[in-house]
Image (cartoon, grey):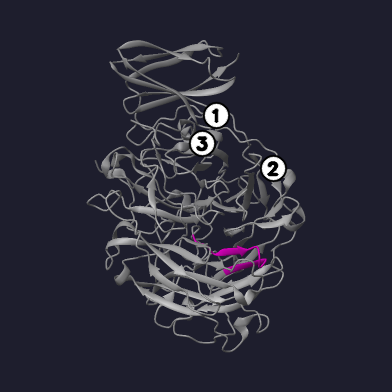
Amino acid sequence: MKKSLLLATALVSGLSLVAQNGKQAAPNKLQAHKATGLNAINQPVADQDAYPMGFSPKVSNPAKILTGPPYPYIANTRNIVGTQTSELNTVSYNEDLNAVVIITRFPTAAIWPTTGTFVSGYMVARWTTDNGQTWDSTNFYRNDVFAGRHPQGVISNPAGNSVLANATYIGAGPATDNGSNWTSTWFASTPLNSTLGTNHEQTTNDVQVASNTVVSNLAYNNYFTQTMAENNGTVWTLGFQLTDPVGRTGITGYNIFKGVVGAPGTPVSWTKDANTLNGPSLYNTSAGEADVTGEFVVFGPDKQTGYIVTLAADATPSPTLGFRPMVWKTTDAGQNWSRVNTTFDWQNAMPAAWGNLRTNRMGDAVAPSFFNTYGGDCAVDANGVLHYVTCVNSQYSMDIDSLGYSFTYDFGHTQACDKPWIIDFTTDGNGSWNGTFIDYIHTSKMGQTASDTTTNYNPWTPGTVYAYDSRLQITRSTDGTKIFYSWSDSDTINSSSVPTQFNIEPNIMYQGYDLTSNMYSDTKKIAYANTNTGAWFPCIGDFAINQGGGDWQIPMMYTESVGQTFNNGSPADHYFVDDAVVLSTDLTVAPRSFPVCPLFVGINEVHANIASIENYPNPFSTSTTIKVGLVSADNITVTVFNTVGQTVMTKSVKGVAGDNNIEVNASNLSDGMYYYSVKVGNSVVTKKMVIQK
């Protein structure tokens, strides 16, 4: 089976990146997959929307939206390349130092250095210890052979140290020959030394780089490093393992790079870890369509528990199940990594989470696919539990040649079941996953190719059309008892002349979660009032700022197009958000249930063998009968689950043509609403039932 889909040849998760000076982003193979013939806007939706189209969550600080730009200025950079990839760690916070460090590419009009062969590839580390009111900085990476791109970094600070000069900032990214070729990966580090006065980059020869290392791509077979974590003096990052490092094709796993931090001012010692994650668990088609995408490495507050997460198609039990989260766990601070949760049934074990998904393009199954299309991020809480926040799309089909495909724009953004759902997927690595509904994405991400109609609503068009995802990100308190979610969304009734369904005037949305009380906050908003602008490309820190009294601040930055040119090759300004606060009094909202949705179908009628489904009585107290009408004999599996997606009962029978009565005994279940899914062949239908005792 072949499909009329645009398949770009990019290998990099989030956004594939071009190395030329113009910094044009190449299409992501996972963004451009829109099923021909399916227009979700015309799909009937019978449910009620929890938020109206013109929703207005609580504004964090209304006074700041009256004048713009409202937030502390950080710096200018020569373009947006370097902050547009939401997986990168561009903001890092350390509690003992009370310091936020942000890494950016070199400014457009820098006083120092005035010249340089690859000045566009230099990196600058900037830090603040007064919540963004003043900034100090130093040239962080400067190399006139290997031009740096797409920086990320983290702070490493000795336990209990509060002196900036004794802390080290470590960064990494891909490097180019300042032309069209990716050549290597750069690593750099510097002490956070503020003794030379304010604004180091204006000092003639202030190069504070302690290590300035370039690792050959050919020697290590790694491509981009797009995740980074610091854990007790060791820094971790991943690089793609390629079958063809010269041609940059055939991703089969990851190289783990480990940097050991020494005394301040001494180079970080980088090695390729022996626990390279490669091999037979990753399924690849001969065409290379199903490789891997999305990568994260995170550690918990105990310094021992950590996870590596990637999205890929698994060769076992069946490669046709498409892209799913693959997880490796360590309990000894990274000395050993073990693959976990390999047998979890994503398709059937959590049906409430897929209530907004259509059946696949061939109309024979509802199956989730994980591509971080709207963004995605990970953190580990105080209990050693992994939190993976993302939105899920429908898998394109169950055929083996469609593993790298999904419905990307299959939401009309009109009602609750017609929008992407933000879900916090959690696991402790013991075989199972749970999911909690966080909120909706109310506006659609924007496209980047001429054939994508959403491109018409993309303001980043004067240069080259530039896609913009919803920047789903996550951070935590240092002790792991608080989790914070952040994403980008536009008010659908915005300041433009016509209401929009597209994210063209993005605000920053955020929400908090208290692990101890199991309570959430309402969604809060950093609003931006300027016409045809917004808080673009927000990036949040790896840790939240403790304000005392149970209040927490999320350190974050956003980018603004200088002169509103919206050209991705033109200068950009960065701003620091100093009031994204979740108060202790905000954390009073109980965990949210998944919305109850009608069955969405694809182009073809999908449940040809299911003539009817009903249960009676409903509501009921002790038992109910699920009546399944089949056209022909087939096996029937009924799964009952609660509002948070946990399975409470499963029953399988050999169905016959005609009516099949399946009794559900609820004597051991408490009052409330439940869902049941009926699976016949590859078809799954989900409905609700209510227990009243």
Magenta region: 88-102
Residue 494 in view: yes
The disc placed on residue 418 is: 3
94 in the magenta segment: yes
Question: Residue 263 sits in which quadrant?
Answer: bottom right
| Image quadrant containing the N terminus | top left
The secondary element bearing badge 3 is classed as helix
Nearest the eye: 56 or 592: 592
Label 3 – label 1 distance at C-alpha: 19 Å
Q: Quick one: label 1 or label 2, which is nearer the N terminus?
A: 2
Q: Which residue is drawn at 50% across and 50% down?
A: 445
Q: Nearer the viewer, residue 679 or 639?
A: 639
Q: Is residue 535 above or below residue 692?
A: below
| Circle number at residue 643 | 1
Instruction: Tell whether 516 sits left or right of 333.
Output: right
Q: Where is residue 124 in the image (x, y as percent from the top left)?
A: 55, 75
Residue bearing the label numbered 2 = 587
Asked if the stretch drawn in magenta spans residue 598, the answer is no
Task: Identify the element where label 2 is drawn.
Answer: loop
Query: What amino acid does circle 1 point to?
Result: Thr
Of mark 3 and mark 1, the one earlier in the sequence is: 3
Q: Disc 3 residue type?
A: Asp
Determine if residue 106 is in view: no
Label 3 – label 2 distance at C-alpha? 28 Å
